[in-house]
Image (spheres, rainbow, N blue to C red):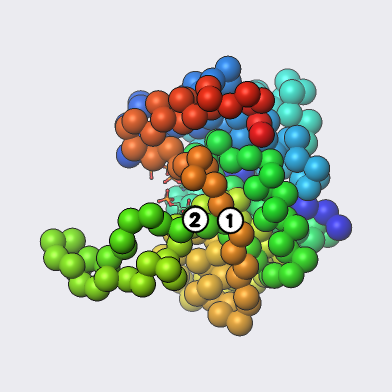
Amino acid sequence: MTTVAVLLAGGTGTRLGAGRPKQFLPLGPHTVLEQCLEVFGGCSAVDEIVLVMEPDHLAEARRLVGGGAHPRVAAVVAGGATRAESTRQALAVIGEDVTHLLVHDVARPLVSRALVEACRTALREFGAVTPVVAPADTVVEASADGRTLERVLVRDRVRRVQTPQAFRAEVLRAAHAAAVREGDDTATDDCGVVARHLPDVTIGLVDGEETNLKITLPGDLELAERLLAGRSPVVP
Ligand SMILES: Nc1ccn([C@@H]2O[C@H](COP(=O)(O)OP(=O)(O)OP(=O)(O)O)[C@@H](O)[C@H]2O)c(=O)n1
Ligand SMILES: C[C@](O)(CO)[C@H](O)COP(=O)(O)O
């Protein structure tokens, strides 16, 4: 059995507005990207890493991993126009012999190795797995224009979805193939692609981590910096 971790860094970071993709911004002693490579590179559950990079920064990423500091990186490929396309770019270079896949947002650099291992382990029971956290707030559905409350959701049943998401390889491949066939690129995560296109697959949930935040908006990087500084080992 072989497990490949797909690290998605194909985005440009428009909402953060830092002038360059957030994956190259400093975080602690490294960058956001290096922090992720460090976590996954040290996971016993991960055999190889495929890094998906924003096309204009492909050469920079290849230089970074070419120095020998990240020996588990097997390939660096160009990202697509959407997150789902970026996942498919990785699937295109991953061999059919690979049995298990992890897909992670590089924008979530504070993920712990324990969470990566928990997601991989849950694949013994499920075809797909995602970490989730329960919201502390009441959650509502807004109207299409966002100005009024449409529906109050049952909070006990609502979860916020994180990455890494884990898949038996044939499940993720089949789900993305169906999405392409049906011309559907609306899912915002890979478990969403499975849920939409392979509804018979049971997607398992594991406990995510509040600290596994997605660096998205201005201020998120400073928060990540403070959380990282508060840890004793760099990767718990
Ligand atoms: N075409 C894309 C878009 C996003 N991503 C990756 O998916 C993760 C989650 O995306 P997001 O937080 O939206 O990152 P960006 O696309 O960079 O940000 P923005 O949407 O603000 O431009 C990130 O690690 C991002 O690099 C990707 O691999 N390919
Ligand atoms: C995959 C994800 O991080 C799960 O919460 C999220 O859907 C990514 O959304 P984005 O708009 O691509 O940042």
Left of 100 or right of it: where is 223? left
Residue holding disc 2: 133
Is residue 227 among the parts visible in the rendering?
yes
The alpha-carbon separation of the residues under discs 1 and 2 comes to 6 Å
- Element assignment for label 2: strand
Q: Amino acid at mark 2?
A: Val
Task: Give the answer, above or below, for where 75 lies relative to 93.
Answer: above
Quarter holding ligand 1? top left
Mark 1 crowd level (few <14, some 14–19, many ≥20, 10 Å Cα) = some
**Ligand 2 within 8 angstroms of badge 1 C-beta:** no
**Ligand 2 within 8 angstroms of badge 2 C-beta:** no
Cβ–Cβ under 8 Å for marks 1 and 2 = yes
Residue at (50%, 40%) from the top-left corner? 211
Residue holding disc 1: 207
For the C terminus, give its image quadrant: top right
Residue at (75%, 58%) from the top-left corner? 121
Mark 2 crowd level (few <14, some 14–19, many ≥20, 10 Å Cα) = some
Q: Can you tell which quarter of the image residue 148 is in?
A: bottom left
Q: Can you tell which quarter of the image residue 174 is in?
A: bottom right
- Residue 52 point in image, percent of width and height: 59, 42
- Residue 24 point in image, percent of width and height: 50, 26
- The tag earlier along the polypeptide, 1 or 2, is 2
- Residue 58 point in image, percent of width and height: 57, 33
Task: Give the answer, above or below, for where 31 lies relative to 158.
Answer: above
Residue at (58%, 77%) from the top-left corner? 198
- Residue 50 point in image, percent of width and height: 68, 43
Q: Residue 147 or 47: which is nearer the viewer?
A: 147
Q: Amino acid at mark 1?
A: Asp
